[in-house]
Amino acid sequence: MTAVAHPKTHESHEPMSFWRKYIFSTDHKIIGIQFLFVSLFFLLLGGVLAMQIRWQLGFPNTAMPLGTMLPEAMTSSGVILPEYYIQLVTMHGTFMVFFAIMPLLMGVYANFLIPLKIGTHDMAFPRINMWSFWLALLAGLIMVAGFFVPDGAARAGWTMYAPLSARPDLSGATYGQMLWSVSIVVLGLSSVMGSVNYITTVINHRAPGMTWFRMPLSVWALFITAILAVLALPVLQGAAIMLLFDQTIGTHFFDPIAGGQALLWQHLFWFFGHPEVYILILPAMGMVSDIIANGSRKPIFGYHSMVFAIVGIAFLGWIVWGHHMFMSGMNPTLGSTFMVSTLLISVPSAIKVFNWLGTMWRGNIKFTVPMLNAVGFVSMFTIGGLSGVFMAATPVDMHIHDTYFIVAHLHYVLFGGSLFALFAAIPYWYPKMFGRMMSEAIGKWHFWLTFVTYNMVFFPMHILGMAGHMRRIYDPTVYDFLKGLQPMNKFITLSAFALFAVQVLFLFNFLWSLKRGKKAEQNPWQDNGLEWSLPSPAPHGNWERAPNVYRGPYEFSAPEAGNADFLPQHVKLPTDRDPAAATAPPSAPAH
Amino acid sequence: MTHATATASLMHPPVPAEPGSGVYSNKLGMWIFLASDVMFFTALIGSYIILRFGAPGEWAKPNAVLNVPLTAFNTFLLICSSVSMVKAYAAIVDGKKYFLRAVPGKLLRDGGLKFWMLVTIICGAAFVGVQVIEYIKLVTEGFTPAGFREGSVLAEHAAGDPVKFGATVAGLYGSSFFTMTGFHGFHVTCGVISMLYLYFTKVLPEKYSPQDYRGIEVIGLYWHFVDLVWIILFTIVYLI
Amino acid sequence: MHWWLPEAASTFAGPIDGLFLAILIITGIALVIVEVGLVWFSVKYRARPGRKAFYTHGSTRAEVIWTAIPAVTVVALGIVSNHYWVQIKGRNSVPPNAYSIGVHVKQFEWQITYPGPDGQLGTGDDFTVRNQLHVTVNQPVVVHLTSEDVIHSFYVPQFRIKQDAVPGMTINAWFQATKTGEYEIGCAELCGMGHYKMRARVFVHTPEEFTAWMAQQAAGGSE
């Protein structure tokens, strides 16, 4: 047993044209990679917008470097105008949430990982999958177009509170607002298509022996997230359509003057929006669970409770939306109810954090770049989760609602959480995508520099928020009580520039390794997942026939493994029995 | 255990994929999509209910603005199309694909897939047609998504009898009426187009058989769902 | 520079700051446990040649403990928070002797209507002042918030009070200032391009000063 036998793969497919193979591809891996490039572009765009926001807050009324290159509608002799500033704030949030983090997690990793990790050749509906990508790209381009129409992009914050968003005469932007609504409707369609695919694939296409409780936590998280997306996005779509009609054909859904209700938008938006928050964090939690178990060379601590925690978060996620509206004039008794559900949702999150700690306990931890970032995720997500408790307590929320405290909180969850998880996931599955490794040395520099500068940017925001610094204000020096905080704003701005500069390391590492990275072995991280039984990069069609699965995905350091400290899911030990001979997938319903 | 055995163990005889839920993927996918669509209509209908109950005035009385008998007829058409869809499904399950049976004098006795699918498509298209006529008529009379158009017949009526015509909340009435029925109509249109596509690519070329009639079952699910949504909409928008 | 909550100038500041501190201590303990655990495990259990990780799938007892402790803590926190929430924002929380002031908000200013010498809003001697809220120290004040156009939010950091003003709704928010002086009102909800400059001032007077100011305004007629 010394020669490595390569599993039979689908390499003998009929040759396909470049267009069918890489552009209008129906292969889940190519679609995942397409999503990766597109959403990294939007991540970069969102970052560029953030830098301009920070310039204005750190150095209000000072000409921005290169600011004179922007058109006069945005800057006046290099100084950012207030109307451009609120576009920046709006579009930074929109791009980061809808076009960077969400597609990075769902578009990239649900696509790439689900079929590979459950042992199937592709998604259930490959063509719908392709459409899902192209619609997401279309939605992104529509959103970008906002900057190029008269009056510029949408101006009502990424939450688009009506009636500001519904009335062009009040917001000052007509086409930008409409483009926002249209783009969100298209994006919703894309997400629903993608999620229908993910759910069906997980339910119907698992390899023999891949029972529900042998699925990796990443697949569990992506599966539950897809359920959230399939139920939440249509609500946003419905709301965006009503908003679009208010903006275009004169309906009055959100216009109180004609009997409409301003709070209706908030209820619809946050009914979608809170599940959305978990859409943005659950996949990150799932992938981090896989990576921490791998890095600690230990089974995940409390697998079942990890699964139930995901399900619990997803379930409770539907009944907490009102905590975004404690100060909105909603009935205060409802506020009490939402406070209780919100506080309860912190329990499953706490279980997850402690189980990650439990996983590391008595492990044999190898600090690869993915593991470093995964541990960074746990430590930063903890801060983000705990700062949420302040806002959940309604009386305290009265003071810190809509201040920089919430900005700090959401960035600790989305950047410290989701993005650190992605900095772990991207190098981790890079070999399976491109057949090469990303540089470990650059990766470690990137992690430490990001970790430090990131905390320098976002931690002080808690202090700003406690002092009462409101969100989305163009010039904090207008207020006397904020003037004294300007040095801190300046410090945050300079740190933010450093944080942005450090990301160049990542981008360079990512692009350089495509061609120059070290050739990847089949299983560079010595992991148990099914994807590592394929060559790197994984071939088109994955397996010729589905692999058999004999155990769960976290059998690291199991006694049966002998000298090795891992035991892949598809390896048959003498004591293992083959999974029950599965029947053929039904081609027609039984009559 | 080394890595070699890991890959070597893949070399045993082919085992087909696990069937998962026991429901084929197209049908499962459609069910999931319908769950998603339920949430879409919940957003619209929920907003309608909230707006109507929170409105500063009473809604227009049934029959004041809308032509209920016309829409009742339209509802009947849509229910007929659901029945014919069931007949189409039953026909293909039994293998009765043909429009004309070979038995002389017993034309159309128990029909067939081609016949019943055609009936469904015609009823669906007629529903959309009637809805378009209804919209044109309403807009001509002055009922628009923004409310009663100034100077129109309905605006005059409303000025005369504000209670009956719900003059204070006409804007909300128009907003929710056109959005809800419009998106339902859009769903019906999509269904008709999909059925036409299936009709020419699968039904007429006789691609379906009692062994494989997935397309008919899946589009049937969608069609019944759209029908059900209409019955809810008809009740809450036209009758109450 | 400011490293803590702003100066406390209303009756809400006591419970809110206390709750803030309590949560800070609780979450601080949790944070220290997690972060110290992460660093400690990272150092202690780092990979060394020849060592193998301890093979375990978890411990039900440990998981029950770290499920129960957070659950009990958050429920307790919820009960305490709700106690103050009802006092601050509950439908019946406005004290009966509260002094009524109308605050009508529009892009981008605060129109503040005083009841005039007769102490009743909606009578002929009401007068309106732009961007200036005058109140009496130690006297409960209820503001009736309305909005002309979009959603704004009434926020006085030193009073720890925040309440959105929503078009189509009248929302009552009350507070009781405890320190005389001048403070700022900020708009805390994005309301358009002038959101940042939607600033007003609050003057907390002694009762004598307030009466004098009221007499002067009433004599000078409304602005």
Image (cartoon, helix red, strand yellow):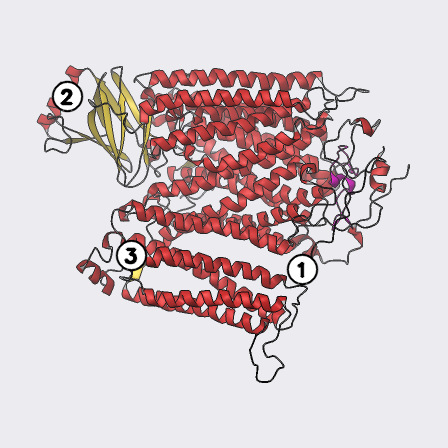
Secondary structure, mark 3, is: strand
In the rendered structure, which amino acid carries the disc numbered 3? Answer: Gly
Badge 1 and badge 2 in a common chain: no
Callouts 2 and 3 close, C-beta under 8 Å: no
User: Image check: B134 left or right of A113?
Assistant: left
Element under disc 1: loop
Identify the residue shown where x is 62% and y is 31%: A306
From the viewer's perspective, is the residue at label 2 or at label 3 nearer? 3
Q: Quadrant of residue C106?
A: top left
Q: Which residue is mark 1?
A: A588
Mark seen at residue C213? 2
Task: Kindly identify the amino acid type of the residue bearing the numbered disc 1.
Answer: Ala
Same-chain check, marks 2 and 3: no
What secondary structure is marked by label 2? helix
Q: If the image is split into quadrants, where does the C terminus of chain C sit? A: top left
Image coordinates of residue A409 in percent, x first then y, are 49, 28
For the record, the magenta segment spans A518-546
Query: What is the chain identity of the residue bearing mark 3?
Result: B
- Mark 2, residues whose alpha carbon is within 10 Å: few (<14), some, or many (≥20)? some
Label 3: which residue?
B147
| Residue A109, magenta (yes or no) | no
- The alpha-carbon separation of the residues under discs 2 and 3 comes to 48 Å
Specify the principal SS of the magenta part: loop
User: In x, y percent, where is residue B183?
Assistant: 43, 57
- The answer to whether the residue labelled 1 contacts the one labelled 2, judged by CB atoms less than 8 Å apart, is no
